[in-house]
Amino acid sequence: MTAIDPAFLSLPLDRLEGVALEAMAAVPGLGYGDLRVHRDLIQGIHVRDRDLISLTDSEPLGFGVRLIVDGSFGFAASSQLTVEAVRSAVLEAAAMARQLRPLLSERVELAPEPQHRATWVGETGRDPFEVPIEQKVALLLEAAGAGLGAGARFTEAYCLQVKENRLFVSTEGSRTLQQRIRVHPSLEVGLIDEGGSGLLETMRSTSRPVGRGWEYVEGHDFPAEAPILVDWLAEKLASPPVRPGPHDLVIDPSNLWLTIHESVAHGTELDRALGYEANFAGTTFATPDQVGRLRYGSPAMHVTGDRLEPFGLATIGFDDEGVEAQRWDIIRDGVLVGYQLNRQMAGRFGNGRSNGCAFADSWAHVPLQRMPNVSLQPDPQHDTTLEDLISTVEEGIYVVGDKSWSIDQQRYNFQFTGQRFYRIHRGHLEGQLRDVAYQSRTPDFWGRMEAVGGPSSWRLEGAMNCGKGQPEQVAPVSHGCPPALFRQINVLNARTEGRS
């Protein structure tokens, strides 16, 4: 797919752009203005056992206007793509900015950004919105049926598909047209824990959301995976409980991505570090005064932010402030060296330029500083494999897949579980364990990371629904990582802890 959807281009984009820029130019005291036109195609398919439970389609469409007037932000939006609505929104945004100005302790300043006039289309194969719905539903029903046929007491499959189109224009002369597609297929099977709790226990597919098309869904082969999931779950239910205490852990990318997301990616958002999120999702222990000296982890820890990773959920050509996509270091050799920045935060950090972290999940929402793809880099010197890491462990646990998690308001103390856990004995896997949760403090955990896998073991994981802000916005984000070895991490028996 190499072109913008003609249905989006057929909208009166040029006319709206011209009227918006003309109206903005007439606003007294205007320092900056932009117009964003958004159209999203969203489809969700949900099947349970042998039935289609829901099929939903939506098409949010509208525009947002953001101004800086006399050093204050103002914002207004409308679902009406008309000349009158644009003029009205510009006036409303200007009025809001003037009303808020007396409440501000300092003027809003945006870090400079070169002018960009470009079209960007994400790397996608088959557009899921061009695949017949009957074909998509049939695939999910086949997968769910395969789970039932393998003995599952319950199966559930779903697929969320999104096509996002955006026009951005600013008073600085930038104009960008963009399109990206993302899909999130998943399959879950359930069995009754006959020998334990008597409750339904589930196991989820290894698939993750990704910035690709329907070819990714078809390529995963969910019908073939279903009986494997049932076998894994049956083995897990029959496995012995974990012995709590310190254990060496080899953590698979399918689990480690979420620990990166919560303890590193959210912990290095500058607006959070400055207290903007304190009332909703907390701040962070990684404060700006520690840049260049806070030891976040071991020397093996190299974390980058980017909007460039192929098929990444946060990959885009330009962010919602017209900033071109980049890649940069956040943690280098285990030391905090950077943050995620939008144009306002970049000015506060003294960075000179935003690294492209502004995103609004809707035409009706103002852009927030949002997470890019945040990834743990592999060992650049050795192509260490998962098997190599496991072979160095005398006694430990291999952790696969994400499940529940908890983290405090400072991104400091946390606990994570997973989908599957295997005992490591003398460098080899020896069957599953159950009831495993690992617990630590962020710098202690990452400080105990002894080794990471090499380039061939690196995988891209992620989530479609990272929440932030008030009113809450939801953003898609990917996290790449290799498997990694952590020494002597505290492991809890989650079942025992739940009873205490």
Image (cartoon, rainbow, N blue to C red):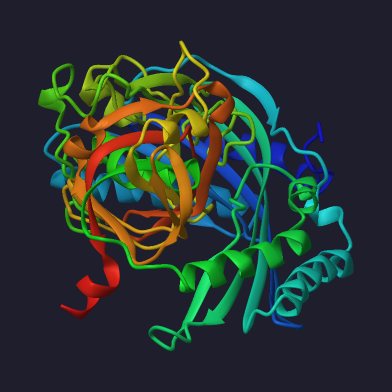
Tell me the quarter of the picture where residue 309 sits.
top right
Q: Nearer the viewer, residue 78 or 310?
A: 310
Would residue 497 be visible to someone looking at this image? yes
- Asked if 144 appears above or below 178 in the picture, the reply is below
Query: x, y (%) of residue 291?
Result: 17, 21
- Asked if 311 appears above or below 57 in the picture, the reply is above
Q: Nearer the viewer, residue 177 or 401?
A: 401
Q: Seen in the image, is 364 located left or right of residue 287?
A: right
Count every numbered label the image shows and give the total. 0
The quarter of the rendered structure image containing the N terminus is top right
Query: x, y (%) of residue 427?
Result: 42, 37
Give me the residue at 80% from left, 46% from top. Answer: 215
Give me the residue at 82% from left, 65% from top. Answer: 139
Tell me the quarter of the picture where residue 10 sits.
top right
The quarter of the rendered structure image containing the C terminus is bottom left
Q: Seen in the image, is 266 located left or right of residue 320?
A: left
Q: Nearer the viewer, residue 419 or 118?
A: 419
Would residue 411 be visible to someone looking at this image? no
Query: x, y (%) of residue 201?
Result: 48, 77
Q: Nearer the viewer, residue 110 or 496?
A: 496
Give me the residue at 18% from left, 58% from top. Answer: 279
Query: x, y (%) of residue 260?
Result: 36, 40
